[in-house]
Amino acid sequence: MDAASGTKSSGQSSAPSTLFFVEDGNTPGKGRSKQSRAHVARVNRQRQKLKSTDIAAATASQSTHVALTASSSSAPSTWTTQTTSRPTQAQARSQSDHHAVQVAGRRDRHSAAALMEARRTQSAPTVSQTIQPVFGGTEITSFSKEHSMEAAEVAKFCFERVLDSWLNPNFKPAWIAAFFQHPIVYHCLSFATGVMQDFTLSRPISSRRLWHRGMTISLVNSALGNLNDIDIEPVLLAITSLWRINTEILVERREVSVLFLPHVRNLSWVSVLGKLGGDPQHGQALAQLVHRKGGLHNFTTLPSLQESLALADLIDSSSRGTRPKFPSLWPAEHFLQALNPALQLLANDIEGRVFASNSLRLPDSCREVYRRLAAVDKMLDDFAQRTVSRAEDFWIGELSSAVQHDLLLLVPYTRLARTDREQTSQATYETCRMAASLYSNAVVFPVSPNDPWLQMHLKELRELLEVSSDSLHNQAPFPLLVWATFVASMAAFWTSHRMFFTNFLRDTLRRSGWTLWAQVEPLLKEFLWRDTACQHGATTLWKFLNVEQDRTVPIDC
């Protein structure tokens, strides 16, 4: 039994905590507590009682009709009485018994038909829906009784599908209490998780989601005018929901394509949230409110909210190619240790070998980021093939967030320490950094190609290649140039940058003498490359290059 904190109010003593029972809905009956078993028994008795009442009402509604039908069928007509000889007593008893059987049969058939008709025409009895895995009751101030069925559906999807992917189970009672008792939490979760549910099921966004969005905006505006006297945590959650789910962009824009397929992620919603847009003004407001609260810590109404805020910031920073506003909350070393058994199974995989050997002479901190990115790429790909344990999916998702955060923190070459600049060339460092960012945003930590990151990274890499094309071929190793321009060509294939990158790649392949796919493919796999994510697009690009015949195959954009 856990206590849920009530709504905070200024100038009043805090209300006593509301108590409710929390138990895993998948636990067998004998393993549940006495309170939860008693509650389930009460709900079952209520359902049986309502079902019996419904059946009795349906049968009673037809009783008069059945009785009249039976009476008219059993009464003899006057003409028959006058023209028929009187039967013997034995015959009369026999006929009476036979007639009684017929009447009873007709009554049974009428009753069955009436019940079937009632079931067909009448709605099913309304039974209160229990939100698993919550048993018991709590004070509800977020929504009215009329909206309880919708709230139960939203809560089931939210707390059993979305939040289970990252929320510590010990904190779930507090979140459910906030859903019941804070209108902002109720409306913003109904909006956000509702849109996510519609999006994942490929169905139109329900008008109810937009109503919840309007209510969320109204409540946030009201709260922002009274920050000193309110609980700010529900406001932070609401702004995060509005930040990462932009229904206007979702409806209006046409998705840009790249020649990559992002990894299939299990419980992580990064692949969903990364496609739903986001207004940067919400991010700026959120950062100011977090600073006002004192940072990403001391959350009580919504414990672990800081992880949701940090993830939203990470997705937004990835989509815009900027540094994260919040520090990393994901200890990469801890997750690597937890995933060590899975990594041992993939020890013979050659991806990332270039970074492990340091043949590029990159700074150690930079090389470690790429090495970890290759490890995440392997495990996400292997997880999609169901070889890596499903129990490890949480650690893989957390490690991918940690590595993406570190990747975004890599500084440009001009801001490196002097010792690091002396160790590697600018061409090698920047080419590798930009290509890794393109690959990660398209495959490992997928965000929408419509967001600014794609054009920004392509433009930066193009400027680097245009300014120092000849020196690049002399300074940067040919394998790096082939891999980087191959990744850039696949990312830019349906953009205005396609001809530049494909021409540069073709020229690089000619200079190196690698004009066969059998020569190029093993080279690519030593950097960042998975067949499931790249093979189809690489085939399209290779046919377009057609370097073996030394001519270009035109493909309409």
Image (cartoon, helix red, strand yellow):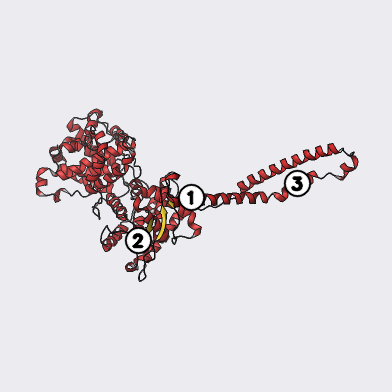
Q: Residues within 10 Å of mark 3 (few under 14, many from 20)?
A: some
Element assignment for label 2:
helix
Element assignment for label 3:
helix
Q: Which mark is residue 426?
A: none
Element assignment for label 1:
helix
Q: Residues within 10 Å of mark 2 (few under 14, many from 20)?
A: many
Which of pointers 2 and 3 indicates the residue nearer the eye?
Answer: 3
* Contact (Cβ within 8 Å) of mark 3 with mark 1: no
The picture places residue 367, in percent across and down from the top left corner, at 17, 42
Q: Earlier in the sequence, mark 2 or mark 3?
A: 3
Q: Which mark is residue 69?
A: 3
Q: Answer with left or right where residue 495 lies relative to residue 100.
A: left
The picture places residue 9, in percent across and down from the top left corner, at 37, 67
For the residue marked with disc 1, what is the amino acid?
Val
Q: Which mark is residue 235?
A: 2
Query: Which residue position is annotated with label 1?
Result: 40
For the residue marked with disc 2, what is the amino acid?
Val
* Residue in view at x 36 percent, y 60 percent: 234
Q: In the picture shown, does residue 448 fall above or below 240?
A: above
For the residue marked with disc 3, what is the amino acid?
Thr
State which quadrant residue 281 falls in: bottom left
Q: Is residue 384 visible?
A: yes
* Residue in view at x 46 percent, y 53 percent: 152
> Which of the two residues, 516 or 78, is positioned nearer the viewer here?
78
Q: Residues within 10 Å of mark 1 (few under 14, many from 20)?
A: some
Q: Quadrant of the C terminus?
A: top left
Question: How far apart are the two marked residues, 1 and 2, measured between alpha carbons?
Answer: 35 Å
